[in-house]
């Protein structure tokens, strides 16, 4: 892994711009910050939009776990004392606890594909 001349960080070769003179061994990040990218040259850093869609994707994937955890905490703290509602809540929690890992596993491939699509 070569070292960037400007920030002295190590990056893989794909993160360097090509060229001689001032452009020699400069990483994409420093090139972007110093306006050294030529016309039409794209930096493959994470854009705002990309970062947003990535965090949305991760949130979508882990939201069921968060709900499940919150539900169990609710049930274990004070949910077991209410007639009827406790049974309904417990039923929903048991079903959720059984279904969430299965759904999580089943959607793994789709998640990987979507993540790869929004990874520069
Ligand atoms: Zn650099």
Image: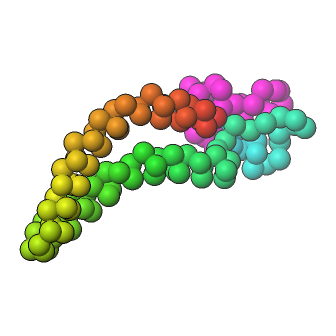
- What predominant SS class does the magenta segment belong to? loop
Q: How many marks?
A: 0
Q: Is residue 77 visible?
A: no
| Magenta span | 1-26
Residue 116 or residue 47, whichever sits in front: 116
Q: Is residue 19 left or right of residue 99?
A: right
Residue 63 painted magenta? no
Residue 32, x across and y down, in percent: 76, 45
Residue 67, x across and y down, in percent: 32, 58
Q: Residue sitting at 88 percent across and 35 percent down? A: 40
Q: Is residue 47 left or right of residue 61?
A: right
Residue 38 or residue 84, whichever sits in front: 84
Residue 12 or residue 113, whichever sits in front: 113
* 94 lies above or below 101: below
Q: Residue sitting at 69 percent across and 31 percent down? A: 16
* 82 lies above or below 99: below
Residue 69 or residue 117, whichever sits in front: 69
Q: Residue sitting at 46 percent across and 49 percent down? A: 60
Q: In the displayed orientation, state which residue is furthest to the front.
A: 84
Q: Residue sitting at 41 percent across and 34 percent down? A: 107
Which of the 4 image quadrants contains residue 22? top right
The quarter in which the C terminus is drawn is top right
Q: Is residue 21 left or right of residue 68?
A: right
Q: Is residue 69 visible?
A: yes
Which of the 4 image quadrants contains residue 77? bottom left
Scheme of image coloration? rainbow
Q: In the displayed orientation, state which residue is furthest to the left.
A: 81
The quarter in which the N terminus is drawn is top right
Residue 53, x across and y down, in percent: 59, 48
Residue 95, x across and y down, in percent: 22, 47
């Amino acid at each position: 892994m070569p070292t960037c001349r400007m920030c002295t960080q190590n990056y893989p070769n794909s993160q360097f711009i090509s060229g001689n003179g001032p452009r020699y061994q400069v990483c994409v990040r420093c090139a972007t910050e110093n306006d050294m990218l030529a016309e039409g040259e794209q930096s493959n850093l994470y854009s705002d939009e990309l970062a947003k869609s990535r965090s949305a994707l991760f949130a979508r994937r882990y939201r069921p776990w968060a709900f499940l955890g919150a539900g169990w905490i609710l049930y274990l703290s004070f949910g077991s004392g209410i007639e009827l509602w406790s049974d309904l809540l417990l039923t929903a929690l048991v079903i959720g606890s059984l279904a969430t890992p299965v759904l999580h596993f089943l959607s793994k491939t789709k998640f990987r594909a979507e993540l790869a699509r929004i990874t520069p």
